[in-house]
């Protein structure tokens, strides 16, 4: 069994049960995958993200991350419009997947969403403590 590296779940973020994080930045939401997801994927080999202007729906896939373990959907924490895409980590663009592995909550972010229903939809997400408990149950 592979050794688990130290997992951390910043308290200023919200989390999905499918291992995405959301950082509310004023009227926008920055989105990425958690350190637990990165650990489970091991080595990322491809990242497919939406285009600026595309729509997202809470709980629906907006992209795909691939590793030697397979292809996995990335789910939107909020309904809204994609206003920014991290080209550094996108396949066919920067392809710097190591940013996701090294800094999943910082430089390894994936997209920024302008949410349609921020207040009502954030109730469906998990706090850092709730997400940590979910991960501990899965380990």
Image (tube, rainbow, N blue to C red):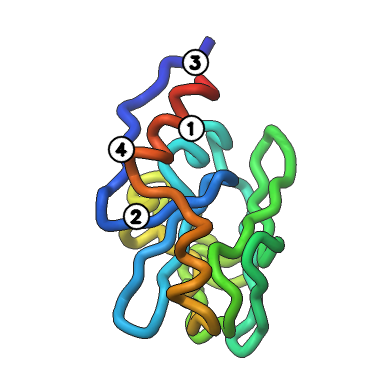
Mark 3 neighbour class, 10 Å CA radius: few under 14, some 14 to 19, many 20 or more = few
| Residue 65 vertical placement versus 89 (above, below) | above
Mark 1, residue position? 134
Q: Position of residue 8 (x, y in %)?
A: 30, 38
Residue 67: quadrant of the picture: top right
Residue 38, how many percent across, how many down? 49, 40
Of label 2 and label 4, which has the lower sequence position? 4
The answer to whether the residue labelled 4 contacts the one labelled 3, judged by CB atoms less than 8 Å apart, is no
Q: Are marks 1 and 3 in contact (CB under 8 Å)?
A: no
1 or 3: tag closer to the N-terminus:
3
The residue under label 4 is 8
Q: Residue at x 41, y 21 (%)?
A: 4
Return the mark for residue 112.
none
Which mark identifies residue 2? 3
From the viewer's perspective, is 112 left or right of 49?
Answer: left
As measured in the structure, the alpha-carbon distance from the residue carrying label 1 to the one carrying label 3 is 20 Å
**Residue at image mark 2:** 105
How packed is label 4: few (under 14 Cα within 10 Å), some, or many (20 or more)? Answer: few
């Amino acid at each position: 069994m592979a050794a688990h590296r130290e997992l951390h779940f910043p308290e200023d973020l919200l989390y999905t049960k499918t291992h995405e994080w959301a950082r509310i930045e004023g009227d926008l939401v920055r989105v990425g995958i958690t350190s637990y997801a990165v650990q489970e994927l091991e080595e990322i080999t491809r990242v497919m993200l939406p285009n600026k202007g595309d729509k997202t729906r809470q709980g629906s896939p907006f992209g795909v991350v691939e590793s030697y373990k397979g292809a996995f959907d990335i789910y939107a924490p909020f309904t809204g419009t994609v206003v920014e895409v991290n080209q550094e980590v996108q396949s066919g663009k920067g392809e710097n997947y190591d940013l996701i592995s090294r800094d999943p909550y910082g430089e390894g972010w994936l997209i920024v969403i302008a949410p349609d229903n921020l207040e009502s939809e954030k109730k469906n997400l998990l706090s850092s403590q709730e997400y940590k408990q979910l991960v501990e149950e899965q380990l």
